[in-house]
Amino acid sequence: MVDLGSGVYAYLHSDNGWGHSNAGIVVGNGSSLLVDTQYTLPMTRALIAAMDDVGIPPVAAVVNTHANGDHCWGNELFPDAEVIASAATAESMPHDFPPALMKALLSDERQSTAAGRYTRLHFSAFDFSDITVTVPTRSFTGSLDLDVGGRAVELLEVGPAHSEGDVIVHVADAGVVLAGDILFADHPVMWAGPLENWIAACDRILETGATRIVPGHGPVVGPEGVTAFRGYLEHINRGIADGFQRGLPYWQTAAELPLGPHEHLALPERLVATTAAAYRHLGAPPVPPPEILERMAVAFFDAPARQLMASHD
Ligand SMILES: [Zn+2]
């Protein structure tokens, strides 16, 4: 738990990988706003304990920045709070890689596939037991102004980008943006897109003038961190368009994409999913999610050079 000053906290993980998502807390007079829960019930209980340790007042509202489980599967542990998300997030939440699917992927009979081995490697530490996906009680489109114990907090819908309904949370009086998965420390994964929307979302963060931005995964950064990430998105956007024009399949474009200054980032296999989503916007037919996962896993196990570099981060 990191105190950002001005009554805003960031709950961060040292592991930037799959499933370890940051949360944010905005403290008002007698009540607070929680931005994103955690992937599992034990992880969310640990978040609640950390909030209690620093004396956070009762959570009156939870904002889910998007529908991925690592940002919302702890919702049920806040039964007295309003749960707020964009309408697109509220719609997609029940279908987004449900907990039962995660458990099935982790089951023994799936270990013969690359996807099964990949899932085991990256997700077996998570306990998906007893999760009841708990959907928002309030949704909006565009923007929503909230009063958090006398403080103005602005929710801005910037998706579809990382997901169908991404929202960023602007706490103007603290100069903070809680960016959800609009910002990653390592390779991001794009499920929705297009990349142009994601680049515009970065501009939206920069336009707020915030000095501290909390990503969905990774450490708190200043505006220069957003600018660098925006540069990454522009870089891969050019590379993906080039591969598409050359008629390469999406997984080959992802594998051969020159990364230049972004070569050191971890989880490069995520480029497979991002490229598949970007190809769809360029006119290619959609790829079924199980195929994307398998291709991503194959890229991981077939790319020891990139992985070895990334694992030293
Ligand atoms: Zn995430």
Image (cartoon, grey):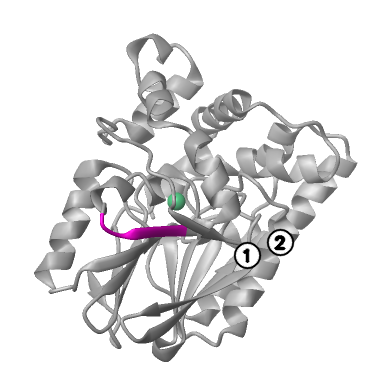
**SS for tag 1?**
loop
Instruction: Quadrant for residue 59, please give it.
Output: bottom left
Residue annotated with mark 2: 197
For the C terminus, give its image quadrant.
bottom left
* Magenta stretch bounds: 80-84
Q: Nearer the viewer, mark 2 or mark 1?
A: 1
Say few, some or many: other residues with alpha carbon within 10 Å of mark 2 (under 14 / 14 to 19 / 20 or more): some
Residue found at x 28% / y 58%: 14
Residue 174: x %, y % from top left: 39, 87
Marker disc for residue 158: 1
- Work out whether 161 lies above or below 100: below
Counting residues from the start of the chain, the first of labels 2 and 1 encountered is 1
Foreground: 233 or 133? 133
Residue found at x 40% / y 15%: 111
Q: Is residue 17 visible?
A: no
Q: Is residue 255 magenta?
A: no
Residue found at x 35% / y 24%: 103
- The amino acid beneath tag 1 is Val
- The amino acid beneath tag 2 is Asn
Marker disc for residue 301: none
Q: Is residue 201 visible?
A: yes
Q: Is residue 83 magenta?
A: yes
For the N terminus, give its image quadrant.
bottom left
